[in-house]
Amino acid sequence: MIRNNADDLFAPNTPGLTPYEKAAGFVESTRSGSKQFGNKLGKPTLEQIWDCSELFTRVTSDGEDGKGGCDGYNPNEYFESKSRHNTMKGSQAYDEILPKLKHAISEGKKFTLLVLVDKKMLRKDLVKMCKRHGISHEENVETLYARLTEIDDPHRSQKIPLHQGSGLSKVEKITGYDQTKHRWISGLEAFKYLFPNHSPEKIRDLITNCIEKEYTKRNSKN
């Protein structure tokens, strides 16, 4: 999936840097180089990765009849997929998820929001991770996070009721909402949920290795 979508994943951002940004020393990667990648990783690449699971059938076109605008489904469940927890800002999160959740409720089905990258871990978790890697943990949260991104994934992996996810507290008041059936599943927990017979860490590493290989291959041509 990474290789098939590589032309889009690694496409340059448009429009390019302004003369003022160039004068300030910015390059495409430090200005917004990850924006194009993040957008294309979320759709369609990530949905295609989830589609490798027997539990997830990808909705192949927006507005597919009977799917309520969701990204995936199985006989008992609907799915929405996001590459990051903050792709939906503030009330936008609630407004986007509401009709999809209501559709799942109307059919008596589960609803799961899959989030690849959740919020940063709490300080106590970052400290534990630092100790595990044998590195200093005497700095503030931002410094610990920056240090850990070089060697590990310092983001939360959660399996929680949907209303506890970012920007979604109001869904708890929706008629028919059931926190045992309507969930926010992120990070390694998402891999564990959709691919229960495989190590979630190995799945994550497989994806990141594929991305690194594609990046190296493209840079070697320059």
Image (cartoon, grey):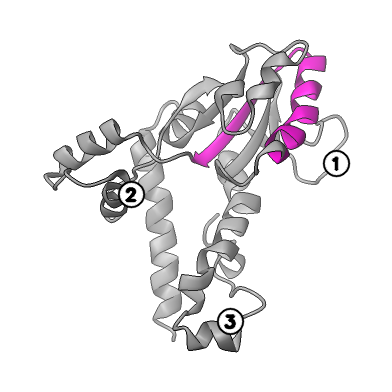
What amino acid is labelled 3 in the image?
Leu
Q: Residues within 10 Å of mark 2 (few under 14, many from 20)?
A: few
Q: Position of residue 208 (x, y in %)?
A: 40, 54
Residue at the spot of label 2: 142
Residue 58 in view in this figure? no
Q: Is residue 150 visible?
A: yes
Instruction: State yes or no: residue 112 in magenta.
Output: yes
Could you tell whether 69 is left or right of 56 in the image?
A: right
Residue 176: percent from left, percent from top: 75, 10
Residues in magenta, as a range: 92-117
Which of the pair 75/157 is nearer the observer? 157
Q: Residue most toward the left? A: 134
What numbered label is drawn on residue 139?
Answer: none
In the displayed structure, 173 sits above or below 9; it is above
Q: Position of residue 199 (x, y in %)?
A: 35, 33
The secondary structure type at the circle numbered 2 is: helix
Q: Quick check: 14 above or below 204? A: below
**Labelled disc at residue 63:** 1
Viewer-proximal residue among 214 and 112: 112
Residue 209 placement: quadrant: bottom left
Front: mark 1 or 3: 3
Q: What amino acid is labelled 2 in the image?
A: Glu
Cα gap from disc 2 to disc 1, whole angstroms: 41 Å
Mark 1 is on which residue type? Gly
Q: Earlier in the sequence, mark 2 or mark 1?
A: 1
Alpha carbon distance from label 3 to label 2: 28 Å
Q: Pointer 3: what residue?
A: 17
Image point (49%, 33%), residue name: 186
When the figure is inspected, residue 86 is found, relative to residue 74, above or below; the finding is: below
Few, some or many C-alpha atoms within 10 Å of disc 3 (few <14, some 14-19, many ≥20)? some
Q: Residues within 10 Å of mark 1 (few under 14, many from 20)?
A: few
- C-beta proximity under 8 Å, tags 3 and 2: no
